[in-house]
Image (tube, rainbow, N blue to C red):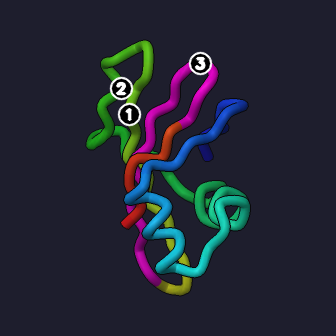
Amino acid sequence: MESLSKEIQYSPPAMLELKKLSLSPEKFQNEIFKEGEIDFKNSKIQNEKCPQYLMKSVYNQRDISIVFRKCDKITQFISIQ
């Protein structure tokens, strides 16, 4: 499990997907994100300032892919599919 920065932001497409899944950001973070595993092979971690990660998780027997950037003070969820 990856830890989150203090400030968390969601892109409009990520928020739309949470709405489709009937998930609040808190439930997403506590249930799906916490249980996910980073796919380092397909993550873009060379950017030391804000590495971009691909995480795989499961929700209601459905595979979920999460793309997020983790900067020093901000974690930004880019897409949730």
Marks 3/2: CA–CA distance? 14 Å
- Residue depicted at x 40% and y 47%: 78
Quadrant of residue 42 in the image? top left
Pick the front one: 72 or 33: 72
Label 2 residue SS: loop
Q: Answer whether residue 57 is magenta in the image.
A: no
Query: Can you give x and y, in whole percent of width and height, for residue 71 in the image?
Result: 52, 23
Q: What percent of the width, then of the height, locates residue 31?
A: 68, 66
Please provide the residue range marked out in magenta: 62-75
In the current view of this chain or complex, which residue is farthest to the top? Answer: 48
Q: Which mark is residue 45?
A: 2
Above or below, 11 relative to 45: below
| Marked residue nearer the N-terminal end (1 or 2) | 2
Residue denoted by label 3: 72
The residue to which callout 1 is attached is 52
Q: Gap in Å between the C-alphas at discs 3 and 1?
A: 13 Å
Instruction: Rate crowding at label 3 as few (under 14), some (14 to 19) or many (20 or more) other CA atoms within 10 Å.
Output: few
Q: Residue 2: image x %, image y %?
A: 60, 41
Q: Which of 12 and 81 lies nearest the eye of the viewer?
A: 12
Q: Amino acid at mark 2?
A: Ile
Q: Position of residue 35 (x, y in %)?
A: 62, 60
Neighbor class of circle 2 (other Cα within 10 Å; few <14, some 14-19, many 20+) is some
Q: Kindly identify the residue that appears in the image at 67 percent across and 33 percent down.
A: 7
For the view shown, which residue lies furthest in the front direction?
Answer: 12
Contact between labelled residues 1 and 3, with CB atoms less than 8 Å apart? no
Disc 1, SS: strand
Q: Is residue 66 magenta?
A: yes
Disc 1 to disc 2, how far (Cα)? Answer: 6 Å
